[in-house]
Amino acid sequence: MRYSMIINLHDCVGCGCCDIACAQENQVPAGVHLGYHQSEMSGTFPKVSYTYRPVMCNHCANAACVKACPTAAMHKDANGLTVVDVAACTQCGRCAKACPYGAITPAPAETAAGQIGAVPQLLQGTSSGADLQKAAKKDYPPHDNALDAYSLPITAVGGPLKCQMCRHLVDNGDVPRCVEACPANARIFGDMDDIYSDVYKLRQEYEASVLLPDEGTLPGVYYIREFKKTW
């Protein structure tokens, strides 16, 4: 099994719903991004072109971060995803330095729940973050109680914080939250080794590109139907 993701750039509208859903699902604090949109503008007016693409951990088959990890804390699981064993991690930081995509960052001591609790009452009659937590009876109000059985948060302070393709969902038969959140259905997730899967069929139908192919990491995130807006 080789879980992969295809991002249809022609359908992606750049709304950022995937980024927001990712941050909320994985309870990452403000300022930390497991996924983001990369945009570029080139040319001279009036001939200007604009391109954008979502960026995340590429879950590479030949992952540089896995090779760099001295304890196998960063490893490939049975589904082909690049994941972290928090208990085995020594927080040496080698994985982050090795990743050519900049997809790994040390987890800060500040948490999303802590940031919510620190939000003051902004207007009379509104609630502070602490009031919201008290009323919701949980430190992280956006958190779905159904997720209590999963292993969240996904790392420890100082450990490697990265997209793990929502493995707490995938291992239970669901799809990554960014896939579910996309209003344009521009993200397609599945087993690339399954010839009946949508990702396999799309990979055969369209010419696909990957980020930094010369690095030899064999990314598991593919881009198809690149859209270039030109004015």
Image (spheres, rainbow, N blue to C red):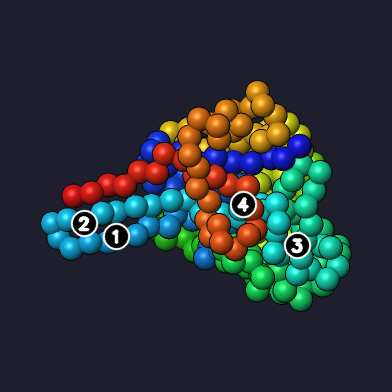
Q: Nearer the viewer, residue 68 or 195?
A: 195
**Which residue is label 1 attached to?**
41
Q: Nearer the viewer, residue 62 or 178?
A: 62
How busy is the neighbourhood of tag 4: few (under 14 within 10 Å), some, or many (20 plus)?
Answer: many
Quarter of the image where one finds residue 62: bottom right
**Which residue is label 2 attached to?**
48
Specify which label sits upstream in the sequence, 4 or 1: 1
Specify which label sits upstream in the sequence, 2 or 3: 2
Q: Image quadrant for the N terminus?
A: top right
Q: Nearer the viewer, residue 151 or 96?
A: 96
What amino acid is labelled 2 in the image? Val
What amino acid is labelled 1 in the image? Met
**Which residue is label 4 attached to?**
219
Instruction: Choose mark 4 or mark 1, whichever is in front.
Output: 4
Is residue 53 at least partly visible in the picture? yes
Residue found at the very far top of the displayed protein: 196
Residue 170, given in percent of the width and then of the height, sits at 71, 38
Give the side of residue 225 with respect to residue 79, left or right.
left
**Which residue is label 3 attached to?**
66
Specify which label sits upstream in the sequence, 2 or 1: 1
Total marks in image: 4
Specify which label sits upstream in the sequence, 1 or 3: 1
Give the side of residue 7 with respect to residue 124, left or right.
right
SS label for mark 4:
loop
How busy is the neighbourhood of tag 3: few (under 14 within 10 Å), some, or many (20 plus)?
Answer: many
Dot 2 and dot 3 residues touching (CB under 8 Å): no
Residue 25, given in percent of the width and then of the height, sits at 62, 47
Specify which label sits upstream in the sequence, 4 or 3: 3
SS label for mark 3:
helix
What amino acid is labelled 4 in the image? Pro
SS label for mark 2:
strand
Residue 77, given in percent of the width and then of the height, sits at 80, 48
